[in-house]
Image (cartoon, rainbow, N blue to C red):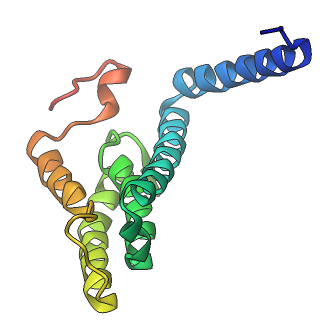
Amino acid sequence: MALNVAVFKTRTISAIVFGIIMMAGLMLNEWSFFILFTIIQFGCLNEYIKLMGLIYPEYHTLAPTHRWGLLLVGIVMMMVLSPNTLSINGYSIKYIGSQILPVLLVTMVAGELYFKKYNLQCSDFFFWLNLYSDVFKLDVSIEGIYGQYLFY
């Protein structure tokens, strides 16, 4: 297999840029860390939804609230797992997320029931419901990255 110099150059430059973005997101401050991992998690959940559609073709027939709800639950879970030091107008995003998440989970279940497209085999919001209950038992956060306790 011959080395294609143009492709190698393009991939090397994009890898360097990606590395710089990752390091900046990790090292700048708590907000950049939070935003970086929220974007990564959103992309991973998008890929998860695509893979579920390939594994279970009936996954595409689920209610639209399921797909969008799953993506929103992922973002809100990042808020719930964030440290208390991240705040907007004096309100911790951890608090905001913990208030939004139960409403979002109930909305997802109601959407499944309303559209009558519920399928237990393809249902992944039970995973999020279980994770939500576990989070408030353990109260895990990313504060451990910044020298504070991981479990408090």
Query: Is residue 94 left or right of 39 when viewed as pictured?
Result: left
Q: Position of residue 127 (x, y in %)?
A: 21, 55
Q: Is residue 30 above or below residue 15?
A: below
Q: Is residue 88 above or below residue 119?
A: above
Q: Position of residue 48 (x, y in %)?
A: 43, 50
Q: Relative to the observer, which residue lies in front, 111 or 143?
A: 111
Q: Position of residue 74 (x, y in %)?
A: 38, 54
Q: Which residue, as the protein is rendered here, is positioned at the far right?
A: 6
Image quarter of residue 27: top right
Q: Is residue 90 visible?
A: no
Q: Which residue, as the protein is rendered here, is positioned at the far front?
A: 1
Q: Which residue, as the protein is rendered here, is positioned at the far left?
A: 137
**Residue ID at (45%, 56%):** 54
**Residue ID at (48%, 37%):** 37
**Residue ID at (68%, 25%):** 18
Count every numbered label the image shows and give the total: 0
Q: Is residue 53 visible?
A: yes
Q: Quadrant of the C terminus?
A: top left
**Residue ID at (44%, 70%):** 60
Q: Quadrant of the N terminus?
A: top right
